[in-house]
Image (cartoon, rainbow, N blue to C red):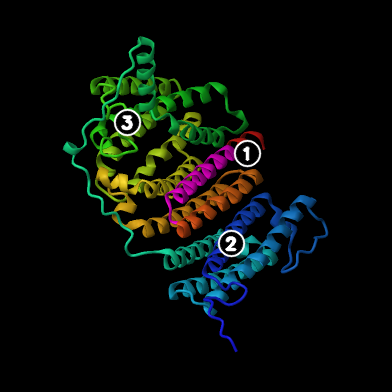
Amino acid sequence: MAVDSTPFPRPIRTRPRFTGLLAATALGVYLLVVVGATTSLSGAASACSSWPLCTTPVDPLNQTELAIAWSHRLAAVVVGLLVAGAALAAGLGDADGRVRLTLLAALGLYAVQIGVGAVTATMGTAAIVPGLHLTLGVLTFGVVVLALAWELEVATGSTDDGVDVEPAPAADAPSPERELPDGTVARLSLTTRAYVSMTKPRLMWLLCLVAAAGMALAAGPALDAPTVVATLLGGVLAIGASGTFNHVLERDVDRRMSRTADRPLATDLVPVRNAVLFGLFLTGASLSVFLTINPLAAALGLIAIVFYSVVYTLVLKPNTVQNTVIGGAAGALPALIGWAAVTNEIGLPGLALAGLIFLWTPAHFYNLALAYREDYARGGFPMMPVVRGATATRKHILYYLAGTLVSAAALTWITDLGWLYAATVVVFGAVFLHFAVRLHFERTEAAAFRSFHASNAFLGAVLVAIVVDALVF
């Protein structure tokens, strides 16, 4: 009789399929958390006062609420089968010991969550500690993602995936020569493009969306056009100022890196003094616009400029491997600016949105760091792939992606966001997770860029959903 040499039992058989099962399980648990939050916030949970079947009460609620409650029950069954199947496949197959124990813990947590759900359905929410059911769901999701990250580390990791490139000395990186056009109009056009590029315009659309989401959460349908225009204009000017100071402070390092060697200050196209004056002008203009809204928005705008230009560029980026993580605060500040522009205070929903952006930043930027890790090594920056290797970086992408999804679910509980936001988070979160898992198996620059673009699509879609959901529904 032939012996089956595959690492996992049928129908899984191969390690990539087992990884796919873990990814589907993680996404299923997350979907259940989001559906559970929607069920609770819509009041649909009261449509079912029995367990495990959902019998219609004598005085039923509307059919929509009943359908939501049934969807939650059915999703719980499917997800339970996924969790049990993953734990069984790990136990019978060639899974790492950590993965087996973690999935066993996930199965135990899920069983407890089912018990809590049964008590809540039959005895009411007052019988259970508030938030316990959601907490158990979030813990189960986190544990399954941990198992997925560890399984991918075993399946695709390497102990020799560091970067051997030494930082390039500044003396060995002279300014690239740039030929200037002869005509006055052509020179003026080139100079204009140089000043625009210093403002990093490609960052503006996403950061402006972050601020817009903060405003929409704060004001809802009552959001007025003057506040929107002033906040976004002040934000664009602040981003431009931050980008300009970043170009000034990194001009020597930019010459060492191929992706930045053609920047205006690296090629001496724009004099340093002019760039500094331009940055100061943008800073002053930004603060002037923000002051037409309220002083808190202006203070937060100034903090954003100083944090990115000084704290991140001079302190964090060249000195610590956690530069991307801590530096995520710079991208999170527009959420607070948008909230403060409407309310003249810092509120919990604004902080929750800022937390989502903060956790998303490493999951997003680590992909770019993987694609350009040799370039960052030449620049002397201690990015995660340079210091700890590609395997650890890919694993941390999954960690921070999980944290991002958890924070997105928390935003559902804190705000009145509804089905559009929930569906967007689940769908685009699945796309991001898919490409993050593919990155582990492909381990190429192209795969890193696909994951990078998927992260952009996720956040862009989620922010648009927040704006539409808050303003329309």
Residue identifier under label 2: 24
- The amino acid type, in three-letter code, at marker 1 is Asp
> Who is closer to the viewer here, 345 or 361?
361
Residue 129, can we see it? no
Q: Earlier in the sequence, mark 1 or mark 3?
A: 3
Q: Are marks 1 and 2 in contact (CB under 8 Å)?
A: no
Q: Nearer the viewer, residue 319 or 305?
A: 319
Q: Amino acid at mark 2?
A: Ala
Q: Amino acid at mark 3?
A: Asp
Give the main secondary structure of the magenta stretch.
helix
Q: Would you identify the image quadrant in which residue 8 lies?
A: bottom right
| Magenta-drawn stretch contains 455 | yes
- Identify whether 30 is placed above or below 18: above
Which of the image's four quarters has the C terminus? top right
The residue that label 3 is drawn on is 262
Residue 274 place in picture, x, y as percent: 27, 19
What is the residue that sits farthest to the bottom in this orientation? 1
| Residue 113, position as x, y percentages in the image | 59, 67
Residue labelled with disc 1? 469
